Amino acid sequence: MGPLQGIKVIEIAGIGPAPVCGMLLADMGAEVILVQRKSSGTNNITDAVTNSKYAIPNRGKKSIVLDLKDPSAVEVVLDLVADADALIEGFRPGVMERLGLGPDVCMDKNPRLLYGRMTGWGQHGPLAQAAGHDINYIALSGALYYSSHRREAPFAPPSLVGDVGGGSMVLVMGLLAGVINAKTTGKGQVIDAAITDGSALMTSLLYSFHQAGLWSKERGDNIIDSASPWYDCYECADGHYITVGALEPQFYSLLLEKCGLSDNPVFSRQFNKADWPQAKNTIIDLFKSRTRAEWCELMEGTDACFAPVLNFEEAAAHPHNRERETFVELNGIVQPGPAPKFSATPLNIASPPPQEGEHTETILKSVGYKDDYIDLLRSREVI
């Protein structure tokens, strides 16, 4: 049932990276209780991905609906927190405090609680109270800068580098480390996970090149930012794209062999930037001479460091992804499967995304609430 069996997490519903963090924990076996507010019923795009069968980040969770503006609902959350290992929230600094659910209150109820705070800018700093989204956070951290060809505007991979990479993944790491520490010390703590911090952390390898003087300030002028002919995306004859990433000399040599370029002198000095523009033009024309399928037949599975650029449907159908169950189908919804793979405690999706408030009664009874009090809360529209 996953390595986090027995871990209980309270997630205050929101959008963006916090729900993905909760999903990752649920995939790994944690019990994740999602505290939701009644949806607006406007059926807009936000509702479609937070309160429906398409809300993949809610898979494996249990849902309780509460009116958090009511003190009785706040008491319910605190009762849930009392025996929880962690709480996740993704609001601007101060929102949880105004609700009466800030770290001090929750950790007074449960001193070993891990209080995970997911924001774009962090809990403090000049920008802490400003609105923003993934593209803004990775712009400020430097993670966006090199994401384009020379003299082209940077392009942000939607929600991947910031929200998920620098946000969800870093908060998961912090929570797991905190849980281990709490089991040793009996003391919880607040985890301030800012996407600016996390996405900056993701540039550590590039900073090694940069600080060593091996990485140019010029965009599109470096070995793995589209300047070299052997590390880029290329269009094929049918309008599809392929990628090559033959960084190491032995892989580069095989790429040239597969492409019939071994004897072309412009490719003889792999790291000579002076040769790159001409070599780039040559390889652009070459890859346009065949279809993506033809290039796949020639190079996929070899050490030429090659892969086709696939859309979502193609990625889910690819034989490698199918064998590894990289994507799964649950109740008719195709989605990425749990990762990573565990040998002794395999991961699984416990359930599809819950209906809003599907587990309200069950959750309330699990903390000792009786039927008459549950009926009272319902009559007052607290639940």
Image (tube, grey):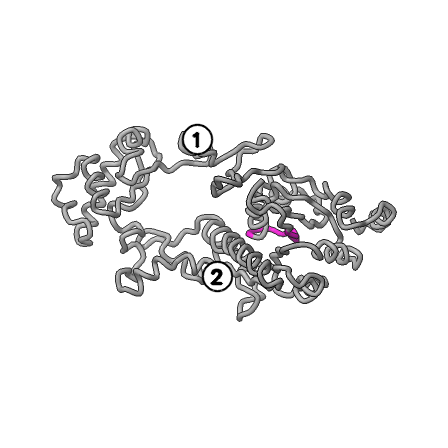
Q: Residue at x 58, y 38 (%)?
A: 349
Indicate which disc residue 196 carries: 2
In this view, the residue in front, 206 or 287, is 206
Residue 121: % across, % down: 53, 63
**In this image, 275 relative to 18: left or right?**
left
Residue 109: % across, % down: 71, 62
Q: Bounds of the magenta span?
A: 9-17
Residue 153: % across, % down: 38, 54
Q: Where is 143 relative to 362, above or below?
A: below
Looking at the picture, which amino acid does disc 2 mark? Thr
Q: Where is 265 relative to 10, above or below?
A: above
Quarter of the rendering occupied by the N terminus? top right
Residue 14 drawn in magenta: yes
Q: What residue is pinned by disc 1?
A: 323
Discs 2/1, front: 1
Q: Quadrant of residue 311?
A: top left
Q: Residue at x 78, y 48 (%)?
A: 383
Q: CA distance from mark 2 to mark 1?
A: 36 Å
Q: Quadrant of residue 297?
A: top left
Looking at the picture, which amino acid does disc 1 mark? Glu
Residue 253: % across, % down: 19, 41
Q: Quadrant of residue 331?
A: top right
Secondary structure found at label 1: helix
